[in-house]
């Protein structure tokens, strides 16, 4: 670790090892002659933004259906499962830990990057488990999918969101497996940043759904 960080300052680290490689471009705050500097918006980034645009349209459609159905005379609001507050805190915390990891990456703090990415992944998994407990709380109250239109939308929206968050957890596992290697490639910072873009979107989406279903 000390050798890796020393190589960052002296330029003695071979290309392709550690965060010292100048091909990271803007991730190091200096240099700029590498791949990320010449290709600031690559195919992978375009793919992520296209996916997010698709998800935005999907949940916009869900929102329209929800608002129309809520105007029905048979609409009965369900009570908020108390664990959702805790789940929301977990998800917000995961965005913070992910940003801390990215900050450590810019400072070449390899072990810290690994630790913060692992913490983000575990918080994401804890959120998913918490959502299952929220379903269990509703079931204990006798509230199921067909109980009311509101409960139907709750199970559907939280389920679809959970599937997409699970995709983010798998992406974090993939990025973490690459970052955990002793030899690095120029793709590591880009992989983490792509995960961050998707993760923050899914986090924000949950806040939107939470407010839509229980505060608005």
Image (tube, rainbow, N blue to C red):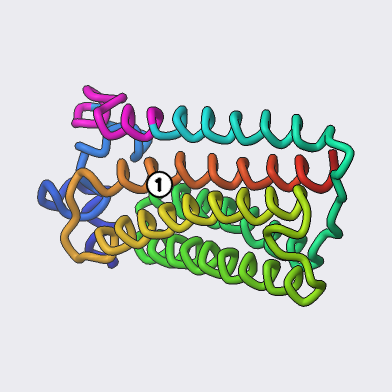
Q: Quadrant of the C terminus?
A: top right
Q: Is residue 35 above or below residue 150?
A: above
Give the camera-side residue of 82 and 59: 59
Q: Magenta region's main secondary structure?
A: helix
From the image, tell me which residue sits under label 1.
195
Q: Is 208 rendered above or below residue 80?
A: above
Residue 53 is left or right of residue 64, and the answer is left
Q: Position of residue 48 (x, y in %)?
A: 37, 35
Query: x and y percent of residue 209 in the render?
Result: 69, 43
Tell me which residue sits at (67%, 28%) in the image.
64
In percent of the image, x 41 and y 53: which residue is there? 167
Disc 1: CA contacts within 10 A as few (<14), some (14-19) or many (>=20):
many
61 relative to 101 in the view: left or right: right
In the displayed structure, 141 sits above or below 165; it is: below
| Residue 135 in the image, given as x and y percentages of width and height | 68, 67
Tell whether position 35 is magenta: yes
Judged left or right of residue 11, residue 56 is: right
Q: Which residues are magenta?
A: 33-50
Q: Quadrant of the N terminus?
A: bottom left
Given residues 49 and 11, the one toward you in this image is: 49
Residue 46: quadrant of the picture: top left
């Amino acid at each position: 670790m000390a050798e890796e960080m020393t190589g960052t300052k002296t330029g003695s680290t071979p290309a392709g090892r550690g965060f010292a490689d100048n091909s990271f471009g803007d991730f190091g705050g200096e240099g700029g002659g590498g791949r990320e500097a010449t290709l600031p918006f690559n195919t992978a980034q375009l793919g992520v933004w296209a996916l997010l645009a698709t998800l935005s349209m999907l949940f916009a459609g869900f929102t329209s259906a929800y608002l129309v159905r809520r105007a029905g005379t048979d609409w009965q609001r369900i009570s908020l499962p108390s664990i959702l507050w805790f789940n929301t805190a977990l998800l917000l915390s995961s965005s913070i830990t992910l940003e801390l990891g990215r900050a450590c990456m810019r400072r070449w703090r390899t072990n810290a990057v690994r630790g913060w990415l692992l913490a983000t992944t575990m918080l994401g998994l804890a959120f998913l488990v918490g959502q299952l407990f929220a379903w269990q709380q509703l079931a204990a109250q006798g509230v199921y999918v067909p109980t009311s239109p509101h409960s139907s939308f709750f199970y559907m929206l939280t389920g679809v969101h959970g599937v997409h968050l699970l995709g983010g957890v798998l992406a974090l596992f993939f990025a973490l497996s690459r970052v955990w290697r002793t030899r690095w490639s120029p793709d590591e910072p880009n992989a983490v940043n792509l995960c961050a873009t998707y993760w923050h979107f899914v986090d924000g989406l949950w806040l939107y759904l939470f407010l839509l279903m229980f505060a608005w």
